[in-house]
Image (cartoon, coloured by chain):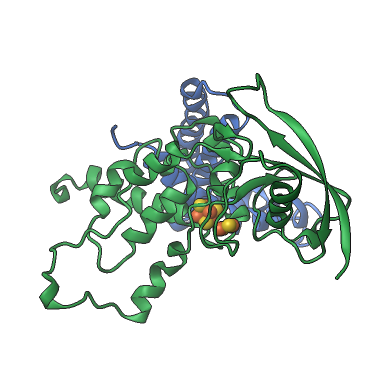
Amino acid sequence: MSQRQITFEVLRYNPEADSAPWIQTYSVPCEEEWVILDAINYIKDHLDSTLSYRWSCHMAVCGSCGMTVNGEPTLSCKAFLRDYKGSKIRVEPLTHFPVERDLVVVLDDFMEKLQSVKPYLMPKTEKPVEEGEYKQTPRQLKNYKQYTMCINCMLCYAACPQYALNPEFIGPAALALTHRYNLDSRDAGRSERQEVVAQHEGVWECSFVGACSEVCPKDVDPAGAIQQMKIASTVDWHLEHLMPWRRK
Amino acid sequence: MAKSNKPIVWGLFAAGGTVSAFVIPVMILITGLLVPLGVFGSEAMSYDRMTAFAGNWLVKVILFGVLTLTLWHAAHRLRVTAHDFGLRNDGPIAIAVYGLAGLFTAVALFALLSI
Ligand code: SF4
Ligand code: FES
């Protein structure tokens, strides 16, 4: 095991005491196989117990440890130190969200958006439990499985330039999850979700920069989901306006 | 909030993007490089040959599609690029770019119909 001394420049902000965010540096003796989160935990345990940040699973499952590392939205438990050359690493909270304290951001906006797209199964008719489960073929599962991998880490929002320009934008992860339920053979809720998806602030705010898919730690490809929904919404629009008798 | 009407222009944009990606590079290669270099002979795109070519109805339809869809693609791309650069007066920009695309769509239509 080899050790490397790395200087961490960490953004600190306590709204009750600080007038503005500031940078504190810590020198951390890092093991080569550590991830960024290990170093942050080291700071918390050995150097400065006042540092606030979120984490839980340490295995890219819970989605709570997103941070901006050297300017990139990063899942800190999945970012290995060996991939960072040099002796300095800067750690800041996720961009485009208000800072609650240090590396902790306020999630409310994302949570509201997530709820607005009804990310749950809405079957045509609710089956009584006695009638057994809703069955699905492996192929039907494969249709949407990729979009179930989202861990709500919000890296995609931090990477999205459109979300930065217009915070009303529903945004990548919420739209990818909409797509996940729309594509599920057990679901019949698409037309309800379209009320949100087909607005300006839904898929149409996206200009396909693709940064969300680049930073996504779970290969969800939200940008792809949004483009597929644009195509479907365009077909809807033409059916609704050019064939009004089809309107429900 | 109401559903957006963006699908009208986005549909043209998407179709135009596909056309631009598949057809325009080879069109540029042929009309911009190979023909001027004389690869297909000096008469390859002479006035007489081209009017006869564009006189065919199927060719007219294809030319109209390729020309106008690319225009609408470019128009929407410019609008979005302006937005990406932080220009937020979207209304006038949209009118300008789509107005130009509409104008040249009409020009293409008249030009093709008059051949
Ligand atoms: S889509 Fe990817 S980047 Fe966005 S919240 Fe889900 S897992 Fe994170
Ligand atoms: S700690 Fe759970 S995803 Fe990083």
Taking depth in this image into account, of B41 and B77 the one nearest to the observer is B77
Residue A112 visible here: yes
Give the percent coordinates (x, y) of residue A151: 49, 57
Q: Is residue A129 left or right of residue A33?
A: left
The residue located at (11%, 70%) in the rendering is A128
In green, which chain? A
Q: How many marks?
A: 0
Residue A161 located left or right of residue A170: right
Instruction: Please say if B40 is above or below A238.
Output: below
Quadrant location of the N terminus of chain A in the rendered image: bottom right
Q: Nearer the viewer, residue B13 or B71?
A: B13
Percent position of residue A45, x then y: 70, 50
Residue A211 is left or right of residue A113, and the answer is right
- Which colour denotes chain B? blue
Give the residue at x 44% y 41%: A110
Decide which of A205, A245 is in the foreground and name it. A205
Where is residue B45 shown, x and y percent of the image?
68, 53
The residue depicted at 32 percent of the width and 59 percent of the height is A182
Residue B11: where, in percent of width, then height?
A: 42, 47
